[in-house]
Image: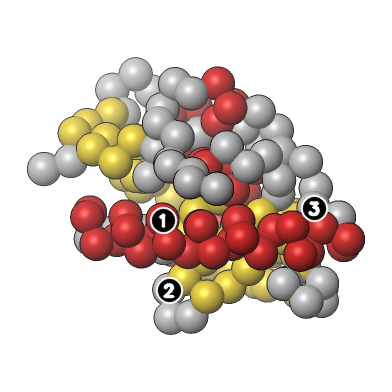
């Protein structure tokens, strides 16, 4: 299962992913391992990367692998209660590693999801975690940061 990270323009990145079903937990284990490997490969090359969504490797399921301090498996996430307060940031993405896009994100939100043991989790997210997981859930919905650009001048190359 040698997946690579899909690049900007690949039609699969614009598709809506399908929910993971409880009986698919064994099926997604090798995908989780591949997401882990690619995240750390990306970190080694670009010194960046906190999470990766399954559609970024062409696996069209609602699955996110995050590793900041420890691995976290996020299955079928739903974001809700987004704050009216937003902030702007230069967003980056593994699908276009040399490009930054200025977007607006909600300062806070809530997210519910299932973990790798199919236990429901509910998180209150703020600031950088809110931004990160909004970005990753967007991938599951076929939305890229380029789609959320504030305007036509909201693009720049990384230095």
Using the rendered image of the protein, determine whether residue 31 is visible from the camera's viewpoint.
yes
For disc 1, the neighbor class at 10 Å (few under 14, some 14 to 19, many from 20) is many
Find residue 63 and report its horizontal and vertical position in percent. Answer: 66, 54
- Position of 150 with respect to 25 (left or right) is left
Q: Which residue is mark 2?
A: 68
Please name the residue that numbered disc 3 is placed on: 20
Give me the disc on residue 38.
1
In the image, taking residue 142 as reference, residue 66 lies left or right, namely left
Q: Is residue 151 left or right of residue 12?
A: left
Q: Quadrant of the C terminus?
A: top left
- Say which label, 3 or 2, has the lower sequence index: 3
Work out whether residue 38 or residue 100 is closer to the camera in this orientation and state it.
38
Determine the CA span between mark 2 and mark 1. 14 Å
Q: Is 7 rendered above or below residue 59?
A: above
Q: Secondary structure at mark 3?
A: loop
Find the distance from the CA under tag 3 to the CA under tag 1. 21 Å
Residue occupying the point 43% across, 50% down: 87
The quadrant holding residue 37 is bottom left
């Amino acid at each position: 299962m040698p997946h690579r990270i899909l690049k900007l323009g690949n039609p699969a990145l614009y598709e809506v992913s399908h929910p993971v079903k409880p009986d698919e937990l064994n099926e997604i284990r090798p995908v989780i391992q591949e997401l882990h490997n690619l995240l750390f490969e990306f970190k080694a090359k670009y010194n960046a990367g906190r999470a990766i969504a399954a559609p970024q490797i062409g696996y069209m399921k609602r699955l996110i692998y995050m590793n900041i301090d420890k691995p976290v498996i996020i299955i079928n996430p739903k974001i809700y209660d987004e704050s009216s307060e937003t902030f702007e940031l230069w967003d980056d993405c593994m699908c276009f590693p040399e490009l930054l896009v200025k977007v607006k994100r909600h300062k806070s939100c809530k997210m519910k999801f299932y973990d790798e043991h199919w236990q429901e989790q509910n998180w209150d997210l703020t600031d950088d975690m809110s931004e990160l997981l909004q970005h990753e859930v967007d991938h599951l919905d076929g939305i890229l940061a380029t789609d959320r650009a504030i305007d036509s001048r909201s693009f720049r190359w990384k230095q």
